[in-house]
Amino acid sequence: MSEKTARMSFISRMTVKPEKEAEFIRLAQALTEKVHAHEPETLIYQFYRLREPNRFAVVESFTSEQAEQDHQNTEHFKALAPGLVECLDGPYVREYLDPLEQ
């Protein structure tokens, strides 16, 4: 598989302002529904609550880097992502997940 068509997967961890948690969850659920309904090149898109207070993560996996770029250019992402970012207490941290060599 070439670099351009290689699957892209990552986990992003974030802290949410306590007073914004309900709004964050609402927006995360709305975005997840839109991604699952309209983005066939997105293989995994799931938010999780972490065990530390106010901590969340999202696991994302796309068929390619282009599919991840396409995801960021959808109308639903452009409409919902800024609200998610406003709920954060500091920056999020993205960690890329590469499959083990077989």
Image (cartoon, rainbow, N blue to C red):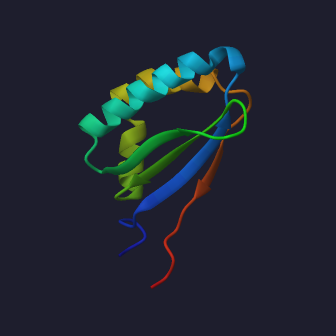
Q: Which residue of the protein is positioned furthest toward the bottom in this rendering?
A: 102
In this rendering, the answer to whether 80 lies above or below 48 is above
Residue visible at 34% across and 36% down in the picture: 35
Name the residue rendered at 32%, 30% in the picture: 34
The answer to whether residue 62 of the structure is visible from this angle is: yes
Q: Nearer the viewer, residue 71 or 35?
A: 35
Q: Is residue 62 left or right of residue 85?
A: left
Image coords of residue 39 (percent x, y): 28, 42
Q: Is residue 74 visible?
A: no
Residue shown at the point (55%, 16%) measured from the top left: 23
Decide if residue 57 is on the left or right side of residue 75.
right
Is 68 placed above or below 80 here?
A: below
Task: Check the image and report above or below for 84 versus 52.
Answer: above
Q: Tell me where residue 79 appears, x and y as whole percent.
A: 42, 21
The quadrant of the rendering that contains the C terminus is bottom left
Q: x, y (%) of residue 49? A: 58, 37
Please state the total of marks drawn on the protein image: 0
Q: Is residue 98 left or right of residue 95?
A: left
Query: Which quadrant does the N terminus fall into?
Result: bottom left
Quarter of the image holding residue 62?
bottom left
Res 76 quadrant in image: top left
Query: Which residue is at the front of the view, 6 or 54?
Result: 54
Q: Which residue in the rendered view is the most extreme toward the top?
A: 19
Q: Can you give x and y, in whole percent of width and height, for residue 97 in the image?
A: 54, 62
